[in-house]
Amino acid sequence: MGLFLSTSIHKIDKKGRVSVPALFRAALEQESFRGVALAPPLGELACVEGSGLSRIERIAASLDKMNPLEEQHAALATAIMARVRPIPFDGEGRIILPEEFVALAELDGQALFAGLGANFQIWSPTNFEAHQTEALKVARASASALPWNTGDGSTNSG
């Protein structure tokens, strides 16, 4: 699985098609599904979460390790798996954004793709700017808590 890095703004055409950034398509080259998996976020963010289908398969495998008779299992499966939409690429590396996702992310002619490592998000450029400002505040306050791999298999905090 590749890494989704950087940000990129792309025009959404009248049919709801948007080009997926070339770096993101390159990160998806090893995927068995030629496209992206999109879903609303679990949190209350005005964006759409995206990844390769293999990440969704890993989440499904984690869910399978839970007791299927517990309420938590059903809640997580409903909140995550039932809302995922596999969206194939067209011949030009574009996807068609479902109308409900365009509305959720408040997209109006442009989509900002923000790489988050193993996944990405799609935002309106204006909403992302405000979100990024808040995220930077949290990150600056908590960066020292990030475990760091020292190269010898151990980790250091801060």
Image (cartoon, rainbow, N blue to C red):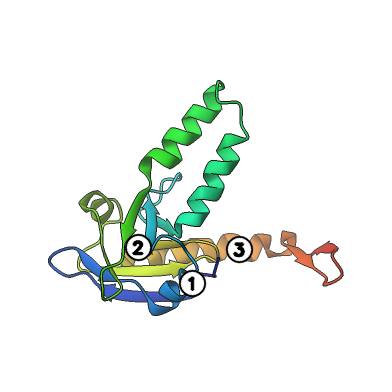
Residue 133 x/y as whole percent:
47, 66
Residue at disc 1, secondary structure: helix
Tag 1: amino acid:
Ala
**Which label number is shown at residue 123?**
2
- Measure how far apart labels 3 and 2 are at the Cα level: 19 Å
**Image quadrant assignment for residue 142:** bottom right
Front residue of this view, candidates 129 and 79:
79
Front residue of this view, candidates 1 and 122:
1
Residue at 40% in and 51% down: 45
Q: Residues within 10 Å of mark 3 (few under 14, many from 20)?
A: few
Residue at 59% in and 41% down: 62
Q: Residues within 10 Å of mark 1 (few under 14, many from 20)?
A: many
- Measure how far apart labels 2 and 1 are at the Cα level: 19 Å
Q: Is residue 99 above or below residue 28?
A: above
Horizontally, residue 14 falls left or right of residue 147, namely left
| Disc with the residue nearer the chain's start (2 vs 1) | 1
Q: Is residue 65 above or below residue 42?
A: above
Tags 2 and 1 touching, CB below 8 Å: no
**Mark in the foreground, 1 or 3:** 1
Residue 49 x/y as whole percent:
41, 55
Q: Which residue position is annotated with label 1? A: 27
Residue 82 x/y as whole percent:
38, 38
Residue at disc 3, secondary structure: helix
State the residue lying farthest toward the top: 69
Residue at disc 2, secondary structure: strand
Q: Which residue position is annotated with label 3? A: 139
**Image quadrant assignment for residue 88:** bottom left
Q: Is the C terminus in the top left, top right, bottom left or bottom right quadrant?
A: bottom right
Horizontally, residue 151 falls left or right of residue 52, namely right
